[in-house]
Amino acid sequence: MPEDELLYELADLFKVFADTTRVKILYALMESELSVGDLADIVGASQSATSHQLRILKQAHLVKFRRDGKSVIYSLADEHVNTILDQGLTHICE
């Protein structure tokens, strides 16, 4: 069994997936890199609320960002995020 500290970190990671808006953001980013404004339109939330959710996703190392002039463009941190979402969806659809 993994050490307790790793189990706490894993539990915290899964808590991030407990919000539908965050999951929608991750699915949108599976398709392409997007700005906060584009993500807000896609998930149907304000830019402020979307920024707040992106901050949580960044802290969990699920998304990354880059600057493009004055814009900030977000993308998934790595392929593991795709795998987590795909496996979760497969599990609930069985």
Image: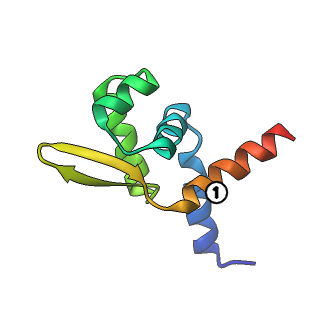
At horizontal 40% and vertical 39% (from top left) the residue drawn is 53
Instruction: List x then y, in percent, for residue 12.
Output: 55, 56
Q: Outermost residue, left direction?
A: 69
Q: Nearer the viewer, residue 34 or 36?
A: 34
At label 1, which amino acid type do we have?
Thr
93 with respect to 56 (left or right): right
* Colour style of the rendered protein structure: rainbow
Instruction: List x then y, in percent, for residue 14.
Output: 61, 52
State the SS at label 1: helix
Instruction: List x then y, in percent, for residue 85.
Output: 63, 48
At horizontal 58% and vertical 44% (from top left) the residue drawn is 17
Instruction: List x then y, in percent, for residue 57.
Output: 43, 49
Q: Determine whether 17 is above or below 83 in the image.
A: above
At horizontal 54% and vertical 61% (from top left) the residue drawn is 79
Q: Determine whether 67 is above or below 32 in the image.
A: below
56 with respect to 83 (left or right): left
25 with respect to 7 (left or right): left
What residue is disc 1 on? Answer: 83
Q: Outermost residue, front direction?
A: 32
Q: Determine whether 27 is above or below 11 in the image.
A: above
Rendering quarter of residue 45: top left
Count every numbered label the image shows and give the total: 1
Rendering quarter of residue 90: top right
Local crowd size for mark 1, using a 10 Å CA cut-off: few (<14), some (14–19), many (≥20): few
- In the rendered image, the quadrant that contains the N terminus is bottom right
Q: Determine whether 90 is above or below 78 in the image.
A: above
- In the rendered image, the quadrant that contains the C terminus is top right
At horizontal 64% and vertical 54% (from top left) the residue drawn is 84
